[in-house]
Image (cartoon, grey):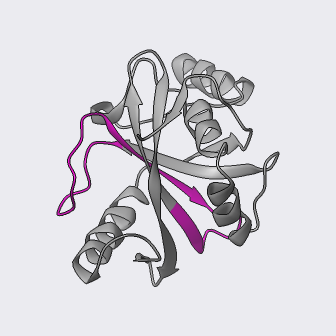
């Protein structure tokens, strides 16, 4: 009981609390910095504007490390970040890679997501029908994990673009 109260108090007092599945927990992962790296790009801001979001807002975010099954390429330290609209009916899945020391590589690719009867459908992104099906399934699985709120603030520290 005391442990639960202390945990609840700690969660209420932090600005960004990371609650992740054990297999994706990273000692150096900071979701607000990863999202901040994404926001360096005008195309990301444009995508988020389609969700009714802009820098300075707070958004619901989910993330997961690892490759997306049935897609390529399978690069080391892949990181997927989904940012949801306020009504949680639309989202964007952004592709990144996490490097050591809290550094992130932004991949120039994202997928729009639309919720339809408890399943997410991917569209607008690189790939064909099979890729969209794989992304849709992946986004639906990710939607079952805990989400966190992140303030959308541009960050350049530790960020680089895919070359």
Residue drawn 50% across the image and 49% down it:
62
Region in magenta: 65-92
Horizontal placement of 18 versus 20: left or right? right
Total numbered labels placed on residues in the image: 0
Q: Does residue 85 appear in this view?
A: no
Residue drawn 63% across the image and 52% down it:
60
Examine the image and state in which quarter residue 154 appears.
Answer: top right
Across and down, in percent, residue 94 comes to 48, 54
Residue furthest right as drawn: 56
Using the image as rendered, state which of residue 80 and residue 141 is in the foreground: 80
Horizontal placement of 71 versus 6: left or right? left
Looking at the image, residue 63 lies above or below residue 20: below
Residue furthest left as drawn: 70
Examine the image and state in which quarter residue 42 appears.
Answer: bottom right
Residue drawn 24% across the image and 35% down it:
76
Looking at the image, residue 70 lies above or below residue 116: above
Examine the image and state in which quarter residue 139 appears.
Answer: bottom left
Q: Does residue 130 appear in this view?
A: yes
Residue drawn 45% across the image and 45% down it:
63
Across and down, in percent, residue 33 comes to 60, 31
Is 54 a magenta residue? no
Q: Main secondary structure of the magenta part?
A: loop
């Amino acid at each position: 009981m005391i442990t639960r109260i202390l945990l609840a108090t700690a969660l209420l007092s932090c600005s960004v609390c990371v609650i992740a599945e054990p297999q994706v927990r990273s000692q150096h992962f900071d979701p607000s910095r990863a999202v901040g790296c994404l926001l360096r790009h005008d195309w990301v801001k444009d995508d988020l504007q389609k969700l009714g979001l802009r820098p300075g807002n707070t958004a619901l975010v989910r993330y997961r490390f690892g490759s997306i099954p049935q897609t390529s390429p399978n690069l080391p330290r892949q990181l997927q970040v989904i940012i949801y609209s306020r009504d949680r009916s639309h989202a964007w899945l952004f592709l990144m890679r996490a490097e050591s020391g809290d550094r992130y590589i932004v991949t120039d690719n994202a997928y729009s997501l639309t919720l339809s009867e408890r399943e997410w459908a991917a569209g607008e992104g690189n790939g064909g029908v099979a890729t969209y099906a794989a992304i849709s399934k992946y986004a639906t699985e990710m939607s079952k994990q805990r989400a966190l709120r992140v303030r959308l603030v541009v960050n350049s520290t530790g960020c680089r673009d895919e070359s």
